[in-house]
Amino acid sequence: MPERTQDTGSTPRPDAGPPRQVAQSGSPATDFSVALLAEFVRLGVRDIVLSPGSRSQALALAAAEFERLGLLRLHVRIDERGAGFLALGLAIESGRPALVACTSGTAVANLHPAVLEAHHSVVPMILLTADRPAELRGIRSNQTTVQPGIFAGAVRLCQDVSAPDGSAGQAEAAVTLAGLAYQTATGTHTANPGPVQLNLAFREPLSAAVDLAADSSVAGLAVAGDTAGQGQPDASPPAGVAPPLLLSSGPRTVVVAGAGAGPAAEELARSAGWPLIAEVCSGARFGPNLIVAYRDLLGDADFGGQIQRVIVFGHPTLSREIPALVQRADVETIVVAPAGLEWYNPGHRVARFARAVAATDEAIAVAGTREARAWVGRWVMASRHILAQDTQLDTPPFGAYGMTRAEFAAMKAPVTRAILADALWRASWPHDRLVLGASRLIRELDTRVSGKKITVHANRGLAGIDGTIATAVGIALASQSGPEPRSTGTTRLLVGDVTLLHDSGSLLIAPGETRPRLQVVVGNDGGGTIFDGLEVAATAAPSAVDRVLFTPHRVDLEALAAAYGWSYTRAATRSALESALTAPVSEPTIVEVPLAR
């Protein structure tokens, strides 16, 4: 969606209501920042992520005061890239947009990766980017670049706001601005939530002391401990939402659930009696119709070759078989997405798009017939048979009758990717969160783990490795502040070593801030082994592949953990891995799992 850029100046909207009484601090930048943050709190924002800088100091000091009063949770991060992804994780888990505040110049540019992920994943985010006033732009003033429009079409709205000067009506202008940003970011009147940029010009004096204890403008605001809506998006439906597209029993059908699909995909598959192909990060990987070994079956003429219709939820990204199925001329594809303006459409072959679908009464009735049960039943049985051919030891470490010699040897054997995937899946429970990085390991889980109704997150909007640690920290922190019993769970992040190193700066937690109940499980094979699967790896010189794709390293992860104040465990055998994953997690922990290339 193209951005909209506007200079709001200081003129309030006509319906902004009676003038707000705001204490005059002597710094218009501070007064405007206080009014802006107060309105965001009133609207339901609970978190602000801040990176340090001079031009944004009014926002920073105001945020610190709001935190002191228990009105906002403040998260300070040195690196803006990590700050943006922390806000992404907070929003993914809480369902509320988080604020991100930064100074001018390259600080703003460093938010771009998180903005892109939020855009493609349809996650709300509100950026407060400080800037020079008009008189300092275009004259090579220090730390000044063209910030309006820097995110191009990745933001739903870009407002270039003139520097406040203390004139009448600016508090109302701030209130109006916050309302517009919040409604746009959450998609209140559209089906397109996402990031919003408020580019806020400030001139000197850049800040003043802030004490809001007796300020009537913040009196009566909800406290930051409020958990209403925790883990849920804004419940108000966008205006003009069409009724669900009704699906008859019709042709031989499968349901596909990609990233972010949610339980609606499983509900449709179960009610209509259709096989369910649900990626591990879909939120729909459970239920009686789940087909785990879908890659093998989609390539089989007796299974995939018989499909006539596919209903796609979410964003499938973990296999080549799904887009190949959608592009078949003999398959009708219907794509379902409740939000967003960018539709999944491989090869431009999708027949129909819908915000919601539902099975007709006729389809639900047909689901109970022998023919319908045979269609889904043969898929389920074939999938189970394929998985049975690749079993790992599934006996608990200690049973009532002890362990056999073979079982004991297996427990002491080195960990494989399959063992790691199985162990992590078994260790996760409904009150936990599982976050999966972009590596070989997410595909390992997708090919083998059974159905389980647990919360799984992954940044699959662009499927990059940027900010994975920061995203998981945000998810962990938001989950801990939510309602029990889900707030008592553990967040586990599974990443490869390259993904960890790419975002290692996000391991830094500021002193005095809440530490996430997070376990980062690192499958360390010394580089980017995911690239071993590329076709070119079979023909290019091995030394060149190693140098420019595999990118080997010798980082000491135990020393890295110690440098950032994280606990560390090495799990080189299955027994050590089982112990690490089942141990109580009370502080941020890195679990290193050595893997063979």
Image: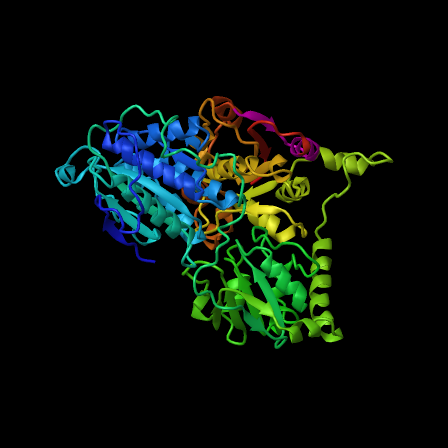
Q: Is residue 104 above or below residue 349?
A: above
Give the quadrant of the C terminus.
Answer: top right
Q: Position of residue 126 (x, y in %)?
A: 37, 44
User: Quick one: quadrant of the N terminus?
Assistant: bottom left
- The answer to whether any part of residue 438 appears in the image is no
Give the image's coloring scheme.
rainbow
Judging depth in this view, the residue of 327 and 527 nearest the camera is: 327
Please name the residue shown 65% across and 31% down the image: 580
- Horizontal placement of 505 versus 161: left or right? right
- Magenta segment: does it hold 157? no
- Count every numbered label the image shows and give the total: 0
| Viewer-side residue, 542 vs 54 | 54
Query: What residue appears at the point 65 percent right and 58 percent down from the top-left corner?
Result: 293
Residue 196 spot, x, y in % from top left: 35, 48
Q: Nearer the viewer, residue 228 or 116?
A: 228
As drawn, which residue projects farthest toward the right? 401
* Left or right of residue 326: residue 270: right
Can residue 467 be seen in this snapshot?
Answer: yes
The answer to whether residue 350 is left or right of residue 139 is right
- What range is drawn magenta here? 566-581
**Residue 463 placement (x, y as % from top left):** 46, 49
For this orientation, the residue located farthest to the front is 18
Position of residue 549 measured from the top left corner of the image (x, y, whole percent): 43, 44
Q: Is residue 155 above or below residue 301?
A: above
- Residue 576 lies in the magenta stretch: yes
| Drawn side of residue 513 relative to residue 291, left or right | left
Q: Quadrant of residue 78?
A: top left
Closer to the camera, 343 or 579?
343
Query: Residue 22 appears in which quarter of the rendering?
Result: top left
